[in-house]
Image: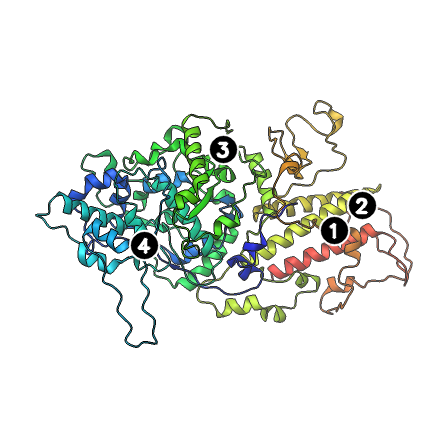
């Protein structure tokens, strides 16, 4: 078994701090901003220049006012982001924001030149003055000699921009209108697409990118690269904030996941002025929302709990439609830029935004495209050295176009191949293959952030409710505010039900079948209970195969009635231990591991429970509570020989043969002892959940 998580990231990850170290973390601060109409008004005279820059659909969207971001819900989602794969690791499988989502939500172009240029800030004041006619004031000299001069980043504060360029004069000439349009675009992209950690400044580099309007930048890929980098850093940050295009992340989450999804109220009128490029994007579906006013700290706990429990069946996998209905929101006409670069959405390519190079790996989330999901997906190293590149840490690197020339060429080749249709033939989604993928994935990563409510040992002894009431989980629930986190209890119950199902199957596999009718009936009963437990655990989100009787050999032919396998019945996939139908799934673990790079970290084998484990269970430090009849059975010894009753030939025997054991000797029947311990455990689990 392989392990997807790299210690380099995992030890500092938010999910590790909460699930392993059991630390309490607060929601992150969101650094993305909307556009206030009172500060920076859009002037229709800007439209030709905004269109030329390729930003018209996006600016038409955000200038109306953007929906509010939910810090608690977004932080709970960020807790599941993994820099190793650039995906969210949920019980649903891997999910992520792709180029398709960026195009549909923002209308930004994917095709174009990577946003990779020289960011040298030497002489930036003179260059800014040449572009917009003024610069921010110089920092004040220190009042005393022992104080250092205040350091100012290359750029301008949003306050300075809005105070000097909020309204374009009515009598402005063409050059002045062009200047105001350039500053307006600089202001917008700095607050929405490339919001940084400070949330106060518009960096000089984004104004420099607008020096020539018709640069044909790939704004969409740059926006996604910047968002990926912000997610990489935020998921390993216990305090602080996150920037990037959080509008795209929020709408992506609302479209696909029910967690934190607000209620839409209405659509405000949209004036497209009969211009197709001014039509709304998919984000218009979330135009006016009901804002949440609850305490973010309380809601954060609720959202964490809900994301831990979400199932694949509860996800809207293809929100933009399927087949011919793709990109048809019904309620309104969609901007053509949302679907113009549809053939580029499957590109496996580098995403570039100056210093940030992040890999776009859509093959890991083919389920989002309605496509066949291989298992495991082809491995692509996201490269820790690339993640380490930062404009503040590597100040000596100025010319990012030269430094990242290899990735610039790769992006251009990927676009060319996608446009020419030179990519592998992709198969449609197959539910059986996706289930195989989930079985592999859930065993290879961490999908739970909330710690289980109880330790496993609590089921080894009879339930003492006074002691359970003092447990940490119940104490936190009593002290909580209106929200009862269900995920800790669900995570505990899910794990114990799965374990009970494993143990039941192990007993059936390792214990020889009895000859008497009573033993056969008991074996059939245990098998039925094991199947119910397995199905119950799968309803809780596990993806485990049901027990297949040893006599049903896979080598038997379907046409042979005596083989125990009929037409259309499932057979067992040896590579992933999944009961699966015959499907052309050649990406199995056994065949893929020979050339896979997934060996990031060795994984210890999964423990299998044997009858000996049951007989030795709870022998150390065991205490017996007199009020529990089930606990008294653990030490039961019968030294009196009683006449053996005649076996009753009924489907389920009401009388069970007692075990005669002398002191110092092993039980005569390991099978009977194992069965008794199995039922004791079931009774204790039920006792804990129900009074």
Label 1: few (<14), some or many (≥20) within 10 Å? some
Identify which residue is drawn at 49% across, 46% down: 87
Question: Would residue 656 be visible to someone looking at this image?
Answer: no
Q: Is mark 3 on a helix, strand or loop?
A: loop
| Mark 3 crowd level (few <14, some 14–19, many ≥20, 10 Å Cα) | some
Q: Mark 4 points at which residue?
A: 122
x and y percentages locating residue 590 in the rendered image:
67, 36
Is 352 situated above or below 19?
above
Q: In which quarter of the image is the C terminus?
A: bottom right
Q: Does the CB distance between marks 4 and 1 fall below 8 Å?
A: no
Residue bearing the label numbered 2? 511
Label 4, label 2: how far apart the Cα atoms are: 78 Å
Residue depth check, mark 3 versus mark 1: number of the one nearer the observer: 3
Disc 3 from disc 1: Cα separation: 37 Å
Evaluate if marks 2 and 3 touch, with contact meaning CB atoms under 8 Å apart.
Answer: no
Label 2 vs label 3: CA separation?
43 Å
How far apart are the two marked residues, 4 and 1, measured between alpha carbons? 67 Å
Horizontal and vertical percent position of residue 479: 49, 70
Q: Is mark 2 on a helix, strand or loop?
A: loop
């Amino acid at each position: 078994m392989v392990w997807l998580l790299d210690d380099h990231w995992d030890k500092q990850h938010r999910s590790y701090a909460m699930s392993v170290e059991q630390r309490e973390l607060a929601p992150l601060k969101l650094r993305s901003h909307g556009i206030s109409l009172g500060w920076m008004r859009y002037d229709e005279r800007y439209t030709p220049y905004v269109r030329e820059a390729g930003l018209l659909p996006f600016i038409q969207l955000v200038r109306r006012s953007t929906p509010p971001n939910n810090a608690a819900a977004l932080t709970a989602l960020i807790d599941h982001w993994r820099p190793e794969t650039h995906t969210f690791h949920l019980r649903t499988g891997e999910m992520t924001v792709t180029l398709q989502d960026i195009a549909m939500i923002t209308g930004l172009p994917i095709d174009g030149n990577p946003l990779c240029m020289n960011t040298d800030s030497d002489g930036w004041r003179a260059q800014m003055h040449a572009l917009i006619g003024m610069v921010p004031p110089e920092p004040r000299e220190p009042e005393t000699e022992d104080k250092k001069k205040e350091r100012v980043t290359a750029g301008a504060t949003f306050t300075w921009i809005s105070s000097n360029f909020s309204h374009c004069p009515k009598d402005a000439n063409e050059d002045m209108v062009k200047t105001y349009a350039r500053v307006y675009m600089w202001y917008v992209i700095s607050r929405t697409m490339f919001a940084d950690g400070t949330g106060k400044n518009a960096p000089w580099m984004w104004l420099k990118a607008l020096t020539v309007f018709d640069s044909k930048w790939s704004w969409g890929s740059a926006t996604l690269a910047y968002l990926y980098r912000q997610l990489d850093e935020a998921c390993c940050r216990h305090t602080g904030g996150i920037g990037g295009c959080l509008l795209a992340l929020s709408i992506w989450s609302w479209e696909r996941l029910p967690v934190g999804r607000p209620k839409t109220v209405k659509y405000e009128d949209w004036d497209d002025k009969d211009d197709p490029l001014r039509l709304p994007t998919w984000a218009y579906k979330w135009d006016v929302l009901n804002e949440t006013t609850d305490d973010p700290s309380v809601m954060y706990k609720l959202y964490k709990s809900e994301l831990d429990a979400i199932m694949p069946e509860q996800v809207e996998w293809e929100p933009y439609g399927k087949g011919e209905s793709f990109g048809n929101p019904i309620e309104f006409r969609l901007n053509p830029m949302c679907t113009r670069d549809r053939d580029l959405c499957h590109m496996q390519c580098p995403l570039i935004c100056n210093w940030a190079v992040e890999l776009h790996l859509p093959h890991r989330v083919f389920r989002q495209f309605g496509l066949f999901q291989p298992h495991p997906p082809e491995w692509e190293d996201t490269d820790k050295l690339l993640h380490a590149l930062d404009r503040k840490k590597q100040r000596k690197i100025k010319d990012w176009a030269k430094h990242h020339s290899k990735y610039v060429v790769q992006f251009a080749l990927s676009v060319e191949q996608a446009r020419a249709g030179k990519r592998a033939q992709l198969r449609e989604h197959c539910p059986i293959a996706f289930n195989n993928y989930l079985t592999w994935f859930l065993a290879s990563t961490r999908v739970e952030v909330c710690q289980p409510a109880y330790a496993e040992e609590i089921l080894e002894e009879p339930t003492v409710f006074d002691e359970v009431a003092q447990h940490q989980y119940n104490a936190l629930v009593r002290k909580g505010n209106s929200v009862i986190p269900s995920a800790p209890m669900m995570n505990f119950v899910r794990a114990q039900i799965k374990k009970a199902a494993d143990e039941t199957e192990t007993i059936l596999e390792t214990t020889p079948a009895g000859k008497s009718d009573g033993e056969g009936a008991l074996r059939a009963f245990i098998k039925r209970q094991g199947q119910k437990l397995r199905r119950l655990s799968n309803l809780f989100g596990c993806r485990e195969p049901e027990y297949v009787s040893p006599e049903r050999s896979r080598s038997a032919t379907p046409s042979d009635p005596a083989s125990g396998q009929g037409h259309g019945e499932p057979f067992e996939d040896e590579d992933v231990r999944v009961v699966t139908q015959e499907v052309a799934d050649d990406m199995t673990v056994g065949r893929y591991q020979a050339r896979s790079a997934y060996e990031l970290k060795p994984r210890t084998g999964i423990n299998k429970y044997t009858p000996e484990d049951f007989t030795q269970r709870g022998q150390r430090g065991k205490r017996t509570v007199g009020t529990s009849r089930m606990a008294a059975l653990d030490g039961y010894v019968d030294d009196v020989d009683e006449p053996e009753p005649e076996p009753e030939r009924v489907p389920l025997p009401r009388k069970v043969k007692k075990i005669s054991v002398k002191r110092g000797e092993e039980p005569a029947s390991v099978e009977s002892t194992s069965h008794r311990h199995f039922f004791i455990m079931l009774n204790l689990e039920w006792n804990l959940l129900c009074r």
